[in-house]
Amino acid sequence: MLIKRGVCGFLLLMLCGFGVATAAEYRIGVLAKNGPAKAMKKWAATAEYLSAARSGDSFRIVPLGFDEVFPAVEKADVDFFLVNSSMFVTAQVRFGAEPVATMINSRQGKPPKAFGGVIFTYVTQDAINGLEDIKGKRFWAVKNSSFGGWQMAYKELMDQGIDPMADFAAVEFGKKHDNVVYAVQNGEATAGTVRSDTLERMAAAGDIDLAEFKILNQRSHAGFPFVTSTPLYPEWPFAKVESVPDEVADSVAEALLAMPPDSPAAKQAKVVGWTQALDYGPVEDLQESLGVGAYQ
C-alpha cells in the first residue's frame, strides 16, 4: 500500500510538472486610435473567440495609445498586437515581431485585404487638377504616424518630384480622417489626404456629397472598389512579439483564418475575417524611402 501511494505520488508530480500543459493567458495589444473604450468594444469578442478556439487558454485585449505600442512590444508586455501596417513594420524591424494573419476589412459591404491613400480637393478649386497644382498651397493630412492618412500620399508625392515639406505653403495634421475632409470642404485646406474608403463612408452616412470632391492623381486597381491616388498596401496585420512560440502563433492563425464572417467577433470588429499574412515588404520600402518608422 505504501509502495502504491509512493508510485501514485511520483506519477502525479510528473504529470503536474512535466506531462500536462498549464493554461496560459495571452495579451493582445490593440492600437486604441479612438480611445480604450471603443477598442475594447470592437475587439473584446475576438479575444473571446480565440479563448474558445484554444481551449484552456485565455486571451484579453490591452488597449494601447500610439506612444504605448512600441514599449509594450519591445518589453513583451503583450504577446500579440494589432496596429496599422506601418507601425507593424517598425516593430518587425526593431523588435523582431512577425505577422500572424492579415485583416480582411469590411468597408461599405466590400472585403478589401489592402488599402491606399486618396488625395483630393474641393470641386470648386478650378485651378487644382493635379498634384503639381498643390504647390504653394495649404495641405492637410491625418497625422505623421498615419499610414493611409499621410505616409502613402507622402511617398506618392515624393515619387512625382514634389516635396510636401518644401513645396507646400503648409502641411497640417487634423488628427482624424473626417477632420481632414471637412477642412478641404470648408476651404481651410486647399487639398488633403485620407485613407481610401473614407470619402465613401462619409458619403454613405450622409455627411458629405462625394460629387463635391475632386480626386487628384486618381488610380484604378483591379477589384478595389474605392477611389485612391496611391498604390495599395496590405491591411493591418495581427502580429506576434518575438518571444511567442511559433506553434502558438500558428494555432492562433488557424483560428483567425477560420473565423466565420457572421460571427460576433467579425461583426464587432467590422471585418469579414482574416487571411494568411500578406507581404509587408512594400511597407518597409516606403519607410526606408521616406526615412520614417523604423528608418526615422
Image: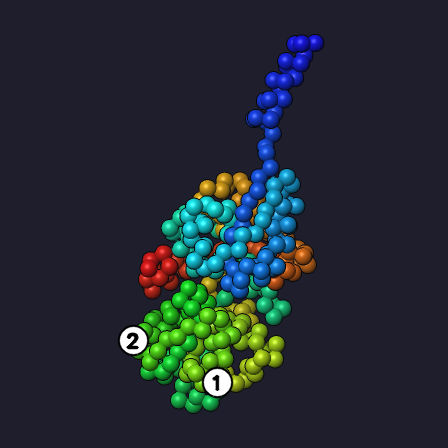
On-image quarter of the C terminus: bottom left
Its colouring scheme is rainbow
Which residue appears farthest toward the right when viewing the image? 1
Q: Of 169 and 256, which appears nearest the observer?
A: 169
Question: Badge 2: how crowded within 10 Å, few (<14), some, or many (20+)?
Answer: few
Residue 74 x/y as whole percent: 42, 48
Residue 272 x/y as whole percent: 62, 60
Does residue 250 appear in this view? no
Residue 231 shown left or right of residue 203 in the figure: left
SS for dot 2: helix
Residue under the image location 63 percent in, 22 percent down: 12
Mark 2–mark 1 Cα distance, whole angstroms, equals 24 Å
Label ID, residue 166: 2
Residue under the image location 50 percent in, 47 percent down: 78
First in sequence, mark 2 or 1: give its number.
Answer: 2
Residue 232 x/y as whole percent: 47, 66
Q: Of 266 and 158, which appears nearest the observer?
A: 266
Quarter residue 1 falls in: top right
Label ID, residue 186: 1
Quarter residue 197 falls in: bottom right
Which residue appears farthest toward the left when viewing the image? 166
Depth check, mark 2 against mark 1: the one in front is: 1
Label ID, residue 165: none
Residue under the image location 57 percent in, 52 percent down: 61
Q: Amino acid at mark 2?
A: Ala
Residue 197 shown left or right of residue 281 in the figure: right
Q: Is residue 247 above or below residue 163?
A: above
Residue 108 x/y as whole percent: 61, 70
Q: Amino acid at mark 1?
A: Asn
Does residue 286 appear in this view? yes
Residue under the image location 53 percent in, 40 percent down: 247
